Amino acid sequence: MFTLKSVLYDDRIEKWQIRDEPVYHHILIFVSGGKVIYQVKEEVLELHEGDVLFIPSGTIRSCQNDAKGPHQKYSAHFTASGEAEAALDVLREHVVFKWSMHNANYFRQRFSMLLMQWFDQVHGGHLICQGILLELVGRLIHDARHKHSSAVKKDLINRLQNYIVHNHCKPIQLSDLAHHIDRSPNHVTRIFKEMLGQTPIDYIHQVKVSVACELLKGGGMTIAEISDHLGYCEQSYFHRIFKKFTGVAPTAVQKGHSIAFVPLPGLSAAARKEAAKNGRT
């Protein structure tokens, strides 16, 4: 349960400043105009129009106008208990939580309604205030969880790409990728499609073909040797895969035919050359 303690609106207050002091309630801040500076511990936070800041109770902070002039912002001071307090944990992971709202205009409208209801409470007004506060905090928690989820997925896809690049000579299976990040094969496929727009199997083949191009240009290995080096059981299968991703046969690249090969995420030209170099040693 959330209990609202106050709702404030700062409208371009000249020389506005608060020196280091703890906040006694949770504070939800939305900047509707200008720019304001907050400092929490050693971190300096610049809040612009459309930015939201959550400050947990007990946090010591200082804040002031930006040097260019005063700002406008809404703030709601509240306490929480039970499940509501636990739900705020995602916002407290890094002491304070700053976020740029994608639906800033709607957030502004709801905060404005909260302010009006706070100062003009009729019968049931406190319930309306509580409902609006729940919605605002709920939207922020939703965005915070999405942000956390995206960071986790980015870390997983980086680990998978790194594994593929450093094991491109092996016949990598989907189960190998799943085991590497301790997830299911279906989860690995979903991550690749969401983050890179392709299947993990296609990405594996792209890495192998990219390395094959460097080896073919080097001229130190035959096509059969390259096929075997990259873990393809049959040379004919390697031919089909190579042509699928480049549009030409491996022999064409050996003869100097130019190809429009799209660079892979996580596999730079330097990495391809290094992999090719390892194939010749």
Image (cartoon, rainbow, N blue to C red):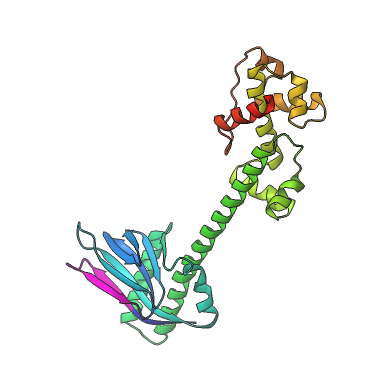
Q: Nearer the viewer, residue 255 or 279?
A: 279
Residue 243 sits in which quadrant?
top right
Residue found at x 61% / y 51%: 156
Residue found at x 32% / y 71%: 61
Q: Is residue 207 visible?
A: yes
Residue 198 sits in which quadrant?
top right
- Name the quadrant of the C terminus: top right
269 with respect to 20 (left or right): right
Determine if the magenta segment contains residue 13. Answer: yes
Q: Nearer the viewer, residue 181 or 70?
A: 181
Q: Residue furthest right?
A: 234
Residue found at x 68% / y 19%: 248
Determine if the magenta segment contains residue 88. Answer: no
Q: Give the residues drawn in magenta, as a range.
A: 7-22
Q: Residue furthest left?
A: 14
Estimate the x, y position of residue 109 in percent, counting from the top left: 37, 66
